[in-house]
């Protein structure tokens, strides 16, 4: 089998403004060079809970970094197969360090299930219970998946053991988030299960209770 050879890839793309996704990919390139496919896989593995992006967006963003001079692209050949591999430039490392020192945008949370929950009185109690059950089951499955990954990190150090300290910070947030999500869905299922219906009714005690808890100052 022929050894892989490298040559510069002719990647031409109009510059687009840099976004958080741009810097997320640049951060991955700070760790090591990746192909576009490897970038999509690593984004899914390490950032899907707090910065999920569709694969097509990642494939477009890597050439944009090249256009800005923050990354370079090379074609890696192995026989008849070839792929484009991206690596960071000194200018890219400097830009990433500057970005790390800037203030972050406020956190945002996105959930289709909560949108459905907010307008559940337009549907049926069964619809709402199914939505909540889906959240609970999804959160539980993801939690078990993350626990397995955490156990692997603890046993082997993972693919980048030198980064384990910062990975642990994000990992703790993800595990706590999934516990919270499953706990909320379980609580909401129990509450809705006691409701006579989701249509407007004279009194639903849970509303008063939730607002009381939210407004009472912590002891």
Image (spheres, rainbow, N blue to C red):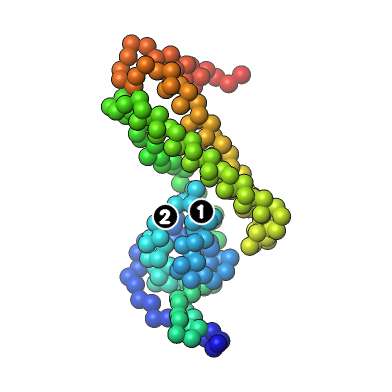
Q: CA distance from mark 2 to mark 1?
A: 9 Å
According to the image, label 1 marks what residue?
A: 47
Q: Is residue 44 above or below residue 66?
A: above
Residue 69 relative to residue 115: left or right: right
User: Pointers 2 and 1 in contact (CB under 8 A)?
Assistant: yes
Left-right relation of 23 to 143:
left
Look at 48% across and 64% down and name the residue there: 39
**Element under disc 2:** loop
Q: Residue at x 71, y 55 (%)?
A: 155
Closer to the chain start, of discs 2 and 1, is 1
Residue 69: quarter of image: bottom left
Q: Give me the residue at 49% from left, 38% from top.
A: 137
Quadrant showing the N terminus:
bottom right
Q: Which numbered disc covers residue 143?
A: none
Q: Position of residue 214 (x, y in %)?
A: 49, 22
Give me the disc on residue 53: 2
Q: Position of residue 124 (x, y in %)?
A: 31, 26
């Amino acid at each position: 089998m022929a050894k892989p050879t490298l040559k510069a890839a002719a990647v031409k793309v109009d510059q687009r403004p840099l976004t958080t996704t741009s810097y997320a990919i640049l951060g991955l390139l700070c760790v090591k060079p990746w192909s576009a496919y490897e970038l999509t896989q690593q984004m899914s593995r390490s950032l899907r809970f707090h910065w999920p992006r569709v694969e097509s967006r990642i494939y477009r963003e890597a050439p944009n970094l090249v256009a800005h001079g923050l990354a370079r692209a090379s074609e890696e050949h192995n026989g008849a197969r070839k792929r484009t591999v991206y690596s960071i430039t000194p200018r890219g490392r400097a830009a990433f360090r500057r970005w790390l020192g800037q203030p972050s945008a406020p956190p945002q949370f996105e959930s289709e299930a909560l949108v459905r929950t907010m307008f559940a009185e337009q549907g049926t109690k069964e619809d709402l219970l199914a939505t909540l059950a889906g959240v609970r089951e999804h959160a539980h499955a993801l939690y078990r998946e993350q626990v397995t990954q955490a156990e692997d990190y603890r046993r082997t150090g993972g693919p980048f053991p030198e980064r384990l300290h910062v990975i642990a910070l994000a990992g703790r947030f993800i595990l706590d988030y999934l516990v919270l999500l499953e706990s909320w869905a379980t609580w909401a299922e129990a509450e809705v299960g006691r409701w006579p219906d989701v249509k407007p009714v004279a009194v639903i005690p849970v509303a008063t209770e939730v607002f009381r808890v939210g407004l009472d100052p912590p002891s």
